[in-house]
Image (tube, rainbow, N blue to C red):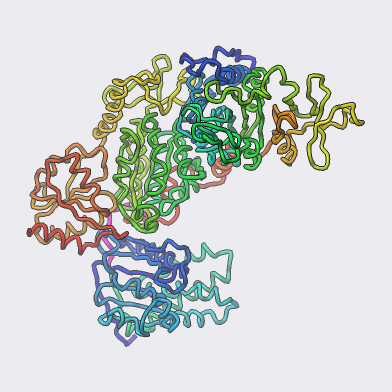
Amino acid sequence: MQDTLNYTLKDFKSESEVRWCPGCGDHAVLNAVQKAMANLGIRHEDFAVISGIGCSSRFPYYVSTFGFHTIHGRAAAIASGVKCANPKLTVWEITGDGDALAIGGNHFIHAIRRNIDLNIILFNNKIYGLTKGQYSPTTDRGFVTKTSPMGTIEDPFVPGQLVLGAGGTFFARCVDNNLKHSQEIFEEAAKFKGTSVVEVLQNCVIFNDGIHETISDPKSREERQIFLKHGEPMIFGNNRDKGIVLEKGKLRVVRIGENGIAPEDVLVHDAMDQDGFLHQSLINMKYPDFPVAMGVIRAFPSKVYNEAMEAQIVEAKSKSKIGSVDQLLSSGNTWRVE
Amino acid sequence: MSIETKVIELEEVSIRFSGDSGDGMQLTGTLFSDTTSLLGNDISTFPDYPSEIRAPQGTVAGVSGFQIQFGNKKVSTPGDLAHVLVAMNPAAVKANAKFMMPGGTIFYDSDSFTQKNFEKAKFKTDDPFTELNLLDYNKVPVPITQLTREALIDLEIDNKSILRSKNMFALGLICWVFSRPLDYIETYITKKFGKKPLVLESNLKVLHAGYNYAWNLQHMTPRYVVHPAPIEKGLYRNINGNQATAWGLLAASEKAGLELFIGSYPITPATEVLQALAERKDLGVKSFQAEDEIAGICTSIGAAFAGDLAVTSTSGPGFALKSEALGLSVIAELPLVVVNVQRGGPSTGLPTKTEQSDLLQTLYGRNGESPVVVVAASTPSDCFHYAYMSAKIALERMVPVVLLTDGFLGNGTEPWKVPTMAELPAITPRIARDAATFKPYQRHPKTLAREWAFPGMDGFQHRIGGLEKDEAGNVSHDPANHQLMCEIRRDKVEAVADMLPQLEVVGEAAGDLLVVGWGGTLGHLDTAVRELLAKGTKISLAHFNYIKPLPSNTAEVFANYKKIVVCELNLGQFVGYLRDKLPQFKYTQFNKVQGLPFTIHELSAQFLKLIEE
């Protein structure tokens, strides 16, 4: 099919004027998603982009596929309905840290638990942008915002931990300013059968400018981020001389060649491990003690809700004596009045 | 037999089975109802059960009841008062004393009339009948527990199972009293317990023991005879309102050529709608038990966007949670059916009791100008028709439709002449055909309905959402446009009136008093009005199934009566709506909010009083 579909990014641009703030990270993510869509070999009319409420949730208007900009927090539920109603569709859910993890937390975890084949792009800028600067469920403790003038007094969610806790099968992370890498990750998310959650570390240029800068700055990217790939050793650094090892049940950063550390001592990433222990540890890695884990951290293929739903219908149809409403109405305990 | 049995011939008779919620009274009642239908009587039933699954044994709070009325003519209600009560314990007598017809018969398990049970039922003395002033009743003590035990003495069966089959003794007994044969019940039990021979044998033994006991005891047991009702020819079945609702939606999906999706969350008394559809995967139903009420409606909205006939079912509190999402379906203009099986409110209220108090919530309970079509079913079996019509309106007019039923309809059963698919009206969803001219919010000039295009349809790609848009579908914050769109959405709902039948009345087209009702009160209002009509009273009934929009001739009908009384199971919601929509008329109102249906008696008394005033 791929041969006959020669889409480019342009095919996925809608006529609507993009109205995010100049410099907003969302522009880059939009481009990366559109490029990924063009590359997937999926027919243009088979895409549906569903969003909730927030800056990033304007996204569907800017993609020329079918799109639905819904209500705050409910994108996961609406996207679940779209996918189950028509499993042939490739369904993308666009959401943010407030939309998915605060008001929509319940739908987020249950979509993941069911493992419905959705691609969830979670824009994490650690702030409420559309309401102009209040703290979100991912805002770090102590952070001063308009609704936390003395700093927040609550600990944030780590999105990947929630995904794992909900029995998630796919979790990946990328940064808005790394377009090429983001595009790769989105394509992998789309190809994965099941709920794929991609956390995009995204910059809000107005209300939380530079929130991810420490790790996202391209100049220090190689030192402060580690790009995980299934089956490859966990090596990072400008000189590719640092690695991650497991010691006494905990991850540690080592320098290859120092203290007798050989390249083969470095962990090899297994995204397909059912046991989420190492994935959890990778998700929790924080700068400066660790590089921040990027790429597909977990991709464990499991049973997919919408496929099971279809299978049950096929099975019921093949076994049942009732194949039409007329047959249903006259089935069971009936009697005839003559 | 030489001993004479007292035979009472009745046009209709009402029986109440009552016991602990674990005593199996609902099954007993259902089996008796089915048997009675098969004999050709018209029936109406009403289960009355507590919200606790198993409230403390022997207490009044734990009493579960099932009332059935059957007759030799059309039966529209389960009956105000019962001729016969079957009481499995003293608490059942206490809970039901007020529902007994003076002079009626009470069969009770005399083994349960112990000091301990009197205390549990909070009787002050050891003479419950005197204490409840039930002296003029025919009281028949039957040692049900002991006789059940003796019937099973040869079987190796534990005490718990013995006690569990007491309901079969009561059922057998009542079948004799009402001259019902046991064959249907035997077939049912055999089917159900075919794989458990011991349970099967014990149930059949106890059933016959009860039947034979009544036969042997006939000198003190009155026997009732109710002749079959003259019923229209055709194929019949018993159906309750929730099942009829589910099947009406199935019929609509088949007729429209669309797959059916239901996203829903369990809630009393609506859960059975979801269950009945989950059972029908053989007809392609996609049933999705959501994580909450909001997800119930939101998954359905997603399915509507994707091109399914989308449905969600709930009851009052759940409907409140769905409000915001319902507004989304209003502004996105997607077809959606929301079923609200109303119960007593506010908040958790009376979960297992019936009420009509969600009307204003349904009409107005959303932010913004947010009109939806509101339809109300009025009997258990016509839930099928109104569910079907709700889907037809939603699909043809691209609008959300709320179908109001209630606990009384949802759980109540009646015989239903089953239709065939060929008899049902066509449903033509407004699916877009021409990609070249398609615009998402382009409308039919008369109905104002937009066209429906969904993902997968090549050339129809478009974006919709909860933001206001202009007629071309582009997001618009223009002030004049917003007013125009609000008016269009209002007018689109009003235009549905052209699909609706005219309002008809029972009785003369003019008179002294017009009784107005809506939804599930039809059986009681109709019976009360017909009884008064038979006595020469100038009374008529106008019953509404279409609330928003109202039938177009409503004002014309109202104008012909001296007085109008609006009767509803709330504090005056429909009457308030009528005062707003048709302010030219003067309305009186009659309201009840006790979690119970009206009684014919209280309605008749009220109507006569109004006519005399």
Q: Residue furthest bottom?
A: B2
Q: Position of residue B263 (x, y in %)?
A: 47, 42
Q: Is A143 displayed left or right of B562 in the figure? A: right
Q: Quadrant of the C terminus of chain A?
A: bottom left
Q: Is residue B103 above or below residue A80?
A: below
Q: Position of residue B139 (x, y in %)?
A: 32, 81
Report the span colored magenta.
B227-238
Q: Residue at 40% of width from left, 67% of height from top?
A: B64
Nearest the camera: B586 or A42?
B586
Nearest the camera: A281 or A333?
A281
Q: Position of residue B82 (x, y in %)?
A: 29, 70
Q: Is residue A299 above or below residue B280?
A: above
Q: Quadrant of residue B558?
A: top left
Q: Position of residue B58 (x, y in %)?
A: 44, 74
Nearest the camera: B59 or A132?
A132
Q: Is residue B349 above or below residue B545?
A: below
